[in-house]
Image: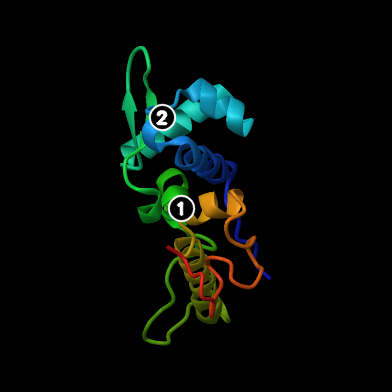
Amino acid sequence: MTSVKVSTRGDYASRALLSLALHGGDEGPTSVRDIAERTGLPQPYLEQILLALKGAGLVRSKRGVGGGYVLARSPEEISLSDIVSAVDGPIVAGDFGEPHTDGACDHEGQCVLLAIWGDAGEHMRRFLESYHLADLARITRGEVPWPGEPGAPGTTGTTAGPA
């Protein structure tokens, strides 16, 4: 089985944006210091991640007194896939290239495995697309079941479904 992992950057970015989703709205911009304290993330690394998220259009910043970060879109419009891709690049199972479409492989087994690795990355991307910040905020607040439980967002065949 191949290992498909979300990087530390992807995890930290997701945690930071979830914090903004939980504390956004009428509270105005949230400082990097406040995000770091709420999430337990190291502030210098968090600053770099927030700059990448700003460049991807997921957050906006305000300078000066009362400054900080806010979500650039509603929590219903930002998926985990958007966040991870913003800091890690495309979600793939590996960087092995594309299978030959004409059936001519350079090495035994190469093409079939390239196709499987491609499918694995696609499954992970679709799974992460099924969770949005609004879903994570509802789970965190205890309003909907935990991931993997019946009725949880991102679970197929449920009535709760992703936002």
Does the rendering let one see residue 95? yes
Mark 2 Cα within 10 Å, few/some/many (few <14, many 20+)? Answer: few
Report the front residue among 36 and 66: 66
Residue 139 placement, left or right of 49: right
Examine the rendered structure and indicate whether residue 103 appears above or below residue 61: below
Task: Name the amino acid, label 1.
Answer: Ala
User: Dividing the picture into quarters, in which one does residue 55 lie?
Assistant: top left
Above or below, comparing residue 26 to residue 126 in the picture:
above
Image quadrant occupied by the C terminus? bottom left
Q: Is residue 135 above or below residue 118?
A: above
Amino acid carrying label 2: it is Glu
The residue that disc 1 covers is 134
What element does badge 1 sit on?
helix
Residue mark closest to the camera, 2 vs 1:
2
The dot on residue 27 is 2
Residue 103, percent from left and from top = 42, 87
Report, in whole angstroms, how far the alpha carbon at label 2 lies from the one at label 1: 17 Å
Residue at point 58%, 67% (across, down):
152
Q: Please state the horizontal and vertical placement of residue 29, each as a whole percent of the image.
A: 38, 27
Question: Of residues 50 and 5, which is closer to you in this image?
Answer: 50
User: Which numbered disc, 2 or 1, marks the residue that appears first in the sequence?
Assistant: 2
Q: Residue at x 42, y 71 (%)?
A: 98
Where does residue 10 sit, x and y in percent of width and height?
53, 45
- The residue lying toward the viewer, choosing from 106 and 83, is 83
Q: Is residue 153 above or below residue 43?
A: below
Where does the N terminus fall, quadrant-wise?
bottom right
